[in-house]
Image (spheres, helix red, strand yellow):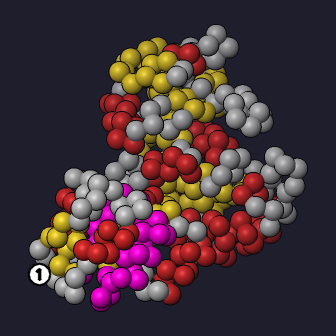
Amino acid sequence: MKLIDLIYPKNRIISIVGTCKNAGKTVTLNEIITQAGEKAIPIALISTGRDGERRDVLTETEKPPIFVKKGTIITTVENAIKPEYAGIEIYSVTDYNTPMGRVVIGRVVEDGYVEISGPYSSRTIRQMCQEMLSFGAELALIDGSLDRRASAAPFVSDGTVLATGAALARSQDLVIDKTMHIIKNYSIPQIDRGEIRDIAAEIIEEGKTRLIKRDLSIAYVGTLTSLRSGSIIAKALTEDTEYVVLSGSATTDTLKDIIQNAKNPIKIIIKDGTRVFISPRELSLLEKMGLELYAIDHINIIAVTVNPYSPEGYYFDAATFLEKMRRALPDIPVFDVMQGGWGYDY
């Protein structure tokens, strides 16, 4: 089975997110584009930042270009429409502005290379994906990144392909450990009580931090954000507090303050796993302290891709790296983006 078979037709909008720069995200994106072309699946492309340029503007390293077929729908910016790239028929000029110009949506009129871009706002990305689908695409691909990982959130995309590789660490085992930690954060369990999930979803939609008591009444907390507000939240806890709902991020300091001051076991609810910003060591410590962390929405990790090469000049044995990652993630299909290891039997 190939990666495209795991993605389509079950999902209409997917994100490709890298664990770090040079993890193989663009190579993964290109392979999905190729496999979609082989099956004649009309696709659309958008980026949470900028991709397709020949050289990374921050690291000055060479980047894989993005090649697309005629008819592909893309989102880009005005200054990225250049003579050396494929021609584009503009369908929509949006109101969203970037330092590179306005964001536009169009159809590629000839086979060639493109530079894709898009808005930073997750909600706007979702809206633009829906618009691109309305122009005839059947599968929208979001080029994301770990620092803009909200593209993996369920309200943005139906599923996520996570790209990881040697650029993350010099040790295979450390790359695997760090990748597993990211997946663990993404895969925190959903809150199973439907009435609690509905109450928490409404609180988070309002952008508030609130407490839910055993009788399902809501207690208000005098803070505008959950960030660095653990001590304020802790002071509001009572013996009948059962849930703490955080509309923002889950950070170590906030969670530690809540757990240490709770008068009974407390369950903490966040929107989804993209809101977790905790290191492996800190997460282990919090779990020993009794952390019970739940999400309203579950992130669908479709597959993991591995890149055994680092631009710093070192590399892993490809077959060993792939096999070790597959053993570490027995429930998630793992593919090699550089060696052509796209087939997967299970």
104, above or below 200, in the image: above
The quadrant holding residue 256 is: bottom left
The quadrant holding residue 50 is: top right
Residue 190 shows in the view: no
242, above or below 101, in the image: below
Q: Is residue 262 magenta?
A: yes
Query: Label 1 is placed on what type of residue?
Result: Asp
Q: Residue furthest top?
A: 83
Name the residue: 43% across, 15% down: 90
Name the residue: 39% across, 81% down: 259
89, above or below 224, in the image: above
The quadrant holding residue 194 is: bottom left
- Spot occupied by residue 296 in the image (x, y as percentages of width and height): 31, 65
Residue 317 shows in the view: yes
Name the residue: 38% across, 69% down: 230
Q: Is residue 247 left or right of residue 98?
A: left
Of residues 76 and 102, the one nearer the viewer is 102
Q: Sort mark 1 into few (<14), some (14-19) or many (20+) by Cα contacts within 10 Å.
A: few
Question: Magenta span covers which residues?
Answer: 242-266
Of residues 27 and 7, the one nearer the viewer is 27
In which quadrant will I find the N terminus? bottom right
Q: Is residue 17 left or right of residue 290?
A: right
Of residues 156 and 323, the one nearer the viewer is 156
For disc 1, the marked residue is: 215
In which quadrant will I find the C terminus? bottom right
- Spot occupied by residue 260 in the image (x, y as percentages of width and height): 41, 83
Describe the element under mark 1 as helix, strand or loop.
Answer: loop
Name the residue: 36% across, 71% down: 231
- Spot occupied by residue 235 in the image (x, y as percentages of width and height): 29, 75
